[in-house]
Amino acid sequence: MKSNYLKYWKVIRNYTKMKYGISQVEMDMLLFLYSEKYFNKSKFHHFNNIMSWDTRRFDKLLKNGWIEVFRKKQGKETTLYKMSHRAKLMITDMYKKLDGEEISENPKCNPMYRKNVSYMGKVQRMMITQMNQEIRKKRLEAED
């Protein structure tokens, strides 16, 4: 079976950004940190070097509750950080969508289905509808 995880990556990415109110670069950083149980600022900045320049990114993620202190500095040991529960839920939700879970078409759960959405949001929601139809079709075929 051929892998097709990234077919709707852009739709899932934009849905996630809109739902959670996060930027692309912040999301990329959290995707990197997802597999890191704990990290220090040095580890953060190691990956941050390949992203667009923003000296406040770490502080913004901390302030907005995407990362949190796990252990404060103790003697010669550096402060350790971890992803917040909210951040882990967001990344887990993205992976579920990539694995074939449908994206909600309910305006209460998905901001792309609200009345005041931009033109691009409307285009994206057409793709969500198409993606969900493909998922349902595959599910029905697998049941037969």
Image: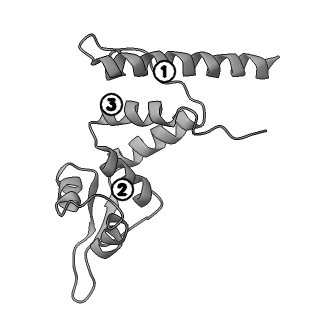
50 sits left or right of 59 in the view = right
The dot on residue 19 is: 3
Q: Residue 94, image x and y in percent?
A: 47, 39
Distance, label 3 to label 2, CA atoms, is: 17 Å
Decide which of tag 2 and tag 1 comes sooner along the chain: 2
Decide which of tag 3 and tag 2 comes sooner along the chain: 3
92 sits left or right of 108 in the view = right
Amino acid type, label 2: Met
Q: Quadrant of the C terminus?
A: top right
Q: Residue 45, image x and y in percent?
A: 30, 70
Q: Is residue 68 above or below residue 136?
A: below
Quarter of the figure with residue 34? bottom left
Q: Is residue 24 above or below residue 76?
A: above
The dot on residue 29 is: 2
24 sits left or right of 60 in the view = right
Tell me the residue that label 1 is attached to.
128
Amino acid type, label 3: Lys
Quarter of the figure with residue 102? top right
Indicate the secondary structure of the residue bearing disc 1.
helix
Amino acid type, label 1: Ile
Q: Is residue 68 above or below residue 42?
A: above
Quarter of the figure with residue 139? top right
